[in-house]
Image (cartoon, rainbow, N blue to C red):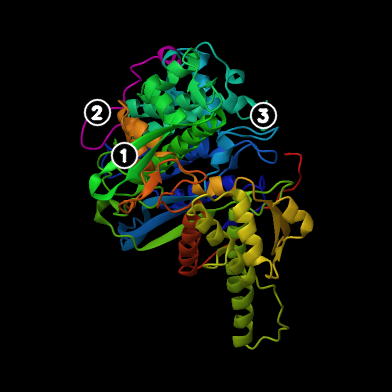
Amino acid sequence: LVSGESGAGKTVTTKLLMGYLAELSERPQENTKLSVNMSIERRVLESNPIMESFGNARTVRNDNSSRFGKYIEMNFSSTPFSSPTNQTEEAKISLVGASVETYLLEKVRLVHQSIGERNYHIFYELFSLKRGVDSYVQDGNDNIHDKVEIEGNDETSQIANESNASLVDKFGLLNYDMEDFRMISNSDTYDRRDGVSDFDTFRDLKRAMNIMGFTKPEQNAVLGVTAALLHASNVTFHEIGEVECALDMDNPHLSYLVDLLGITKEDLNKALCYYEIVVGRGASGEENHFRELSQSQAEKGVEALIKATYGALFQYLVGRINASISGSDTTDGNVSNRGHGKSSNVGRKSRDSNKKEASIGILDIFGFESFEVNSFEQLCINYCNEALQQQFNRFVLRNEQEEYHREGISWSFIEFPENQDVLELIDSKGSGILNILHDQCRTPGASDKTFALSLYDKCSSHSRFEADSRQVAQQLFAVNHYAGSVEYNVEGFVEKNRDELPKEATDLLLASKNEFVQTLAKILQPENTQPSAAGSSKSTRPGPSKGASNRPTVGIQFSSQLHSLRQKIDDTSPHYIRCLKPNNELV
């Protein structure tokens, strides 16, 4: 378990651990046709550049901050090994597969960054394509289109059919720079302070995608959606009367957006500027009615589209990584679209029919956060830290002292703080903050204000909860965490916890002519949907006075993930690595 504050070195430490374990287990390839580039050890390590490009960003404290938590499980098996020294058969431990599970990707960063921070690295790396057609087609070890021999056939990965210049034109970047896109210019920060070049990390990303088995069309599809989101941030609307609005059809970014997503301007306008109300009349059938949305509501719809699409893209990439490193089907290094969708474990069959005999998990999780303004993300992050702190207290402090007692060592027991009451305040069924928020998100007409009122009503008597007259007036509350008191602002809690894309926009993506966009749209589909009762009236648009979907809210999903993670930790023998930040000057 790797812990520490932002910028202390958790991500680098995790990569060092993965590299060390992979190096210990790497064995010579028995089939010479299988390039070392395609070994399970190499692919496990090459997952890092992909995860960092799409999940890391520059923050005030760190130039390569992971904006999500991850748990990497590396699976091992023993195989017979003939020792050349004593002519005896020994057991060699080999890495036979791995899986990655991710937690709580920070989607709000996609539409807002604080001064001195950046959006996700990939949006800046994309502009590396503009450095010239020949910049990436190099010889030797620096060739990002390294040829990879695949076991079982003589095929090799092909250099892109489209030149960088044609990609730049296709992605709509030819006449634009970073400063021209709202999505990456609102913080006026475009570089990294650690000296790392976006050109170099983009080269690493492309090489990693080749090694992981991403086909060239698949790579271009991923980058194409990334570029589409840049253009989406620049779309504009015209007001029509007091309420209605419409897309600015003359906006040049709109053409690139619809082309890259495989949709039409008219359908996008309908999805963003109107919502559908379905009125059920029992046996008489249903009636569909369309209602207008204001310009501010349409702009919120664009933000929701950006966040949902990028979230699905990230989930797709994690699923593809898991399909490549699971250890199954390794005879075909060119893994196609297997494993897309879920960001959890995908397959655990090990190569050469070896069975997993043991595993080592590596947890790289966000540290405790307390800023000037704290929101829903900080509550979830600090909730996670509370749970892990409790596990640490119980395993290290209590168990160690009990061991001293069993061994008869003279020892004065150390009292350590118990934080079970904080966990109950946050996740208790019925009266916990996350459950109150979940209930509010499933209540018609719910808002941040109604959530705050319900919170004050149900939690005010809890010893770890604070909400004085000033805080109530400003819709604030504080939680006394193990690391200190943190004040939270409820603004945005309901919207962030819902994290929903309106049905109109989801249907739009499902109808795309782009198969990859259709795949992302399917990821966005709720796993369980229940039809409304006959005679009811429902809207497919989340918001005041509207019904809500049956999709689990973010807080409930995260709580479930955290409980599962704690069970994994309890089933293992934990080891702790604490990263310490020596200074705040990034030196």
Residue 323 appears in which quarter of the rendering?
Answer: top left
Crowd rating for badge 2 (residues with CA inside 10 Å; few <14, some 14–19, many 20+): few
280 part of magenta stretch? no
Left or right? Give the position of 266 relative to 174: left
Q: CA distance from mark 1 to mark 2?
A: 55 Å
**Which range is magenta?**
149-168
Q: Nearer the viewer, residue 84 or 464?
A: 464
Q: x, y (%) of residue 390?
A: 60, 68
Q: Earlier in the sequence, mark 3 or mark 2?
A: 2
Q: CA distance from mark 3 to mark 2?
A: 45 Å
Q: Nearer the viewer, mark 3 or mark 1?
A: 1
Q: x, y (%) of residue 382?
A: 63, 57
Q: Earlier in the sequence, mark 3 or mark 1?
A: 3
Residue 480 appears in which quarter of the rendering?
Answer: bottom right
Q: CA distance from mark 3 to mark 1?
A: 46 Å
Q: Nearer the viewer, mark 3 or mark 2?
A: 3
Q: Nearer the viewer, residue 491 or 566?
A: 491
Q: x, y (%) of residue 572?
A: 47, 67
Judging by the rendered image, the residue that carries numbered circle 1 is 287
Residue 492 appears anywhere in the view = yes
Residue 200 appears anywhere in the view = no
What amino acid is labelled 1 in the image?
Glu
Q: Are marks 3 and 1 in contact (CB under 8 Å)?
A: no
Whether 465 is drawn above or below 291: the answer is below
Judging by the rendered image, the residue that carries numbered circle 3 is 187
Whether 106 is drawn above or below 379: the answer is above
Judging by the rendered image, the residue that carries numbered circle 2 is 155
Whether 348 is drawn above or below 569: the answer is above
